């Protein structure tokens, strides 16, 4: 049996565009003589449609898309991720479903049984869980279906339901199909392969897994649709972060030669896709990046160029009296290396007039946070003005370590449409840039990679005046935010004194109010700020 | 049996402070000879603790609070809203529970059965549902317990479980106790009374309902704990938006004389409580409000004074070349009426230098959005600078109609720590101010109430140049956002042509990216932006 796994990139709620993509995939499958086409979870609606699912017209519009899709399925079977009305009068009004079509007829629906309600997932808000396993026979093959989380139970304690995999044991399947919208984070690809391999071994059945690709707001889907043998060996795999048809034979049994990708390549491709999908799906063409001469804005400029092309990117360099000469030199050299147009706008006149305007109205006090924040806010004002006048969309250049500590100015450097590296810790930013430097060379001026981090908002300022060393800070962020350890455990594992850990953790929570007004950060870690981490601003625990 | 309903105001996660409040209530109950003390849902943890619940130490710290509470319950029974470890190995690790104590001994736990997963509620993310009804006998009274949503099933389709009320029928209770953390919105108090009255009639039992009071971030709890007779008549009710002990006799049967409160009083007290609790719980003392001469900032200044006292509030008036003389006169008169210090800072010099700084770097184009936004951003920069230097916390003055349409400048007038009136539509702002004017008189200069709305960012600008008339716009917002009607239904009900409704609805969705970076808005409507409405930025449906 010849299959095509249609690893497509749907846009949330754009039913017409998604339907067109689905019809194109079906055409290609027929041209290639395939018997079975598999689409990702919620391929028709995109994932996650969030409260669009509550709109009265949404389900009706979804239903209207099926006519053409059914018609296109002549001589072929298709498994399509979609939503449907809950057939039971109890519970939430919708189900997260797989529609099965064979030879232009509806064979049936499978409703997802395990609805994730943790981290970035909120499916219980919208969906009623299914409770019935599903399989169908096509061209003499018995094909079972599960949807994403259905295979992940042990990682996600569920409030109800039983193990959907267990329910399929003894069904003597010729193939298990998993459709998924499984968002990327650093550890997800290897976790996912383990889960899929184990499932195919448990059922002693080949497994076809089709995953979405593309970015919707903060979530980035990496694709990597794949085929496992009944022995749990990887037979074939589609590319990462690209739309692709994975075509193959269900009976193929020769394991695929494994090639390893570095995490750096994954993160860079993920972030570039996050940028380009926001631009493509929202109709933007050109990006704006404020350069400081530091490594964060340098990486964001590189990613913007990778995502959009250098002609679509504009850089602004906005020096103040505290900007070192080297920062200007490095910024201009970086823009030159990346073939990006860069203008320099001195903020000194605005800084002077701001102080002159304010001083009669405020108490006399030494140069402090106000003066530092002012520079950052003048820069954001100029960047946004440039954006308003020229139609370049501003990218935010803040990193996860800064966001964690609130080492950022609200309405200043926290501005922008996308937090491009808002889920990347400072030490990882160094690693990514070193990797790029090694792969491509000649992108980053050497001094950008080696200089000591500074916000340059007052004379001789260094990040280390305010923050602990980044390796220590990032270790605490990893352990506390991403792994959920307690301060005591962190102190033990990382051999940091408990008082330091407790102080840093408290500072992370105190900065919550800033993160609440930050642009969304493209998610590449197990636990990003924003969507996956819901914390109160006002709280007395930490 | 004499009861005390302890309508307290817990702080999320501040276990020490909440425990102290609980101990004080128990003392007062004993002094007044009460037999039974009832605390609200999650009184010990505050509501909602969100992902603090996922912290490893949280449950252990909660458990540590019980010692003193048990000890204090000599000669008395207490029903305490708290959390506990899920006694079952399946499902989420915690339960939303009522701990029952009698004479210093733990009688047992009741676990909430219906966990809301809609609007602002996300309990399935954290809790496993209970499945067992609970009652206990104290001083010869058989007392049943439910928690909040347990009585609301018909309004909130649940993914599982049965009706907890039904399960108690036939139990011959002498009293049903409901503990709740039921947040306020305009329609909630009357809905809640219906639900409670119906439950007491269904069980033919008196009902004691104890609700939280106070604000945690955007959610405001109105209290209004109450006692219903077995005939469903209201016997006693605690105050709205205040901490209060409601002490009474379970056997009392004389219905309470109803007095009606206007919705205006409710909303004003809710918003003032939202401000003051943020300040008290976060340790802020002084507030800053930017005055424009319009009605929105006037209402926010009034609310700030009501919440904090006029000595704690500072106003800034920030005129540009487009500010009309009347705006200055009105702002200064308003500040005088409310006895608030007000300074005037002219933004003209900064506006001029901004344009001079930018013009060499941008294409020549007529006065437009850039120039308008610049003024708004200069104002926010000065307000934030003033805040940074003086420690006054900036309040946001945007309303819900503007937020809906994106008629607001990101990093400009969208700045501030709290969206004080971000869930109040423009037409309701007029109604609230008219009501205040009638009740108190002499607060608002008459011209503030009567002038036509204008952002005053260009010559002769009026809101109606850009927006439809507010009554029409607000009707669409009410129907679409708050009631969830489809554009077609709205067009029919409101007799507006469908094209206009569709255009406005599309504009609401297009402005999502601005709202994502807005301060949280105090919630007073059935459906506020932010917490209760989760919408994608990138989407192709609307």
Image (tube, coloured by chain):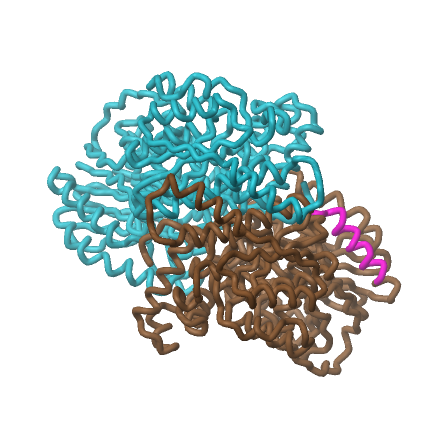
Chain colours: A brown, B cyan
Residue found farthest to the right: A31
Magenta stretch: give its range: A14-28
Choose between A299 and A428: the one closer to the eye: A299
Choose between A318 and A315: the one closer to the eye: A318
Q: Position of residue B101 (x, y in %)?
A: 21, 51
Q: Is residue A166 visible?
A: no
Residue A15 on the magenta span: yes
Q: Position of residue B168 (x, y in %)?
A: 35, 43
Q: Is residue A342 visible?
A: yes
The C terminus of chain A sits in image quarter: bottom left
Q: Position of residue A429 (x, y in %)?
A: 55, 70
**In the image, residue B311 above or below residue B469:** below
B35 vs A332, left or right, is left
A75 vs B420, left or right, is right
Q: Main secondary structure of the magenta part?
A: helix
Choose between A411 and B326: the one closer to the eye: B326
Q: Quadrant of residue B340?
A: top left
């Amino acid at each position: 049996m010849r299959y095509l796994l249609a690893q497509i990139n749907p846009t949330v709620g754009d039913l017409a565009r998604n339907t067109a993509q689905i019809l194109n995939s079906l055409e290609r499958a027929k041209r290639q003589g395939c018997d079975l086409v598999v689409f990702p979870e919620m391929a028709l609606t995109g994932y996650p449609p969030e409260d669009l699912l509550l709109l009265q017209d949404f389900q009706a519009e979804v239903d209207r898309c099926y006519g053409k899709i059914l018609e296109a399925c002549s001589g072929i079977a298709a498994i399509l991720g979609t939503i449907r009305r809950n057939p039971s009068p109890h519970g939430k009004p919708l189900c997260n479903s797989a529609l099965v079509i064979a030879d232009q007829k509806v064979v049936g629906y499978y409703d997802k049984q395990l609805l994730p309600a943790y981290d970035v997932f909120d499916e219980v808000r919208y969906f009623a869980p299914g409770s019935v396993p599903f399989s169908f026979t096509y061209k003499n093959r018995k094909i079972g279906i599960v949807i994403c989380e259905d295979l992940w139970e042990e990682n996600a304690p569920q409030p109800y339901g039983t193990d959907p995999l267990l329910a399929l044991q003894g069904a003597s399947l010729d193939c298990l199909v998993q459709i998924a919208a499984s968002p990327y984070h650093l550890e997800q690809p290897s976790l996912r392969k383990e889960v899929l391999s184990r499932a195919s071994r448990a059922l002693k059945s080949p497994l076809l897994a089709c995953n979405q690709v593309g970015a919707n707001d903060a979530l980035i889907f990496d694709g990597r649709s794949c085929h496992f043998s009944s022995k749990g060996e990887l037979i074939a795999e589609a590319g990462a972060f690209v739309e692709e048809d994975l075509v193959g034979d269900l009976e193929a049994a020769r394991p695929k030669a494994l090639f390893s990708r570095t995490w750096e390549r994954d993160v860079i491709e993920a972030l570039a896709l996050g940028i380009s999908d926001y631009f493509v799906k929202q109709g933007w063409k050109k990006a704006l990046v404020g350069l400081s001469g530091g490594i964060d804005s340098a990486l964001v400029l590189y990613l913007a160029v990778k995502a959009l092309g250098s002609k679509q990117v504009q850089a602004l360099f906005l020096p103040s009296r505290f900007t070192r000469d080297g920062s200007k030199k490095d910024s201009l050299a970086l823009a030159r290396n990346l073939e990006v147009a860069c203008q320099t706008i001195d903020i000194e006149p605005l800084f002077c007039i701001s102080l002159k305007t304010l001083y009669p109205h405020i108490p006399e006090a030494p140069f402090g946070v106000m003066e530092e924040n002012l520079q950052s806010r003048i820069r954001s004002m100029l960047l946004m003005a440039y954006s308003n006048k020229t139609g370049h969309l501003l990218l935010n250049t803040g990193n996860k370590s800064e966001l964690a500590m609130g080492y950022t100015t609200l309405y200043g450097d926290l501005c922008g449409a996308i937090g491009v590296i808002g889920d990347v810790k400072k030490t990882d930013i160094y690693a990514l840039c070193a990797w790029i430097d090694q792969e491509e060379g000649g992108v980053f001026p050497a001094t950008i990679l080696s200089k000591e981090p500074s916000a340059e908002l007052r004379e001789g300022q260094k990040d280390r005046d305010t923050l602990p060393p980044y390796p220590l800070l990032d270790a605490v962020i990893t352990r506390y935010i991403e792994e959920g350890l307690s301060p005591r455990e962190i102190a033990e594992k990382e051999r940091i004194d408990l008082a330091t850990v407790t102080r840093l953790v408290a500072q992370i929570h105190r900065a919550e109010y800033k993160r609440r007004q930050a642009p969304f950060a493209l998610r590449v870690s197990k636990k990003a700020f924003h969507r996956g981490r819901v914390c109160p601003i006002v709280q007395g625990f930490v």
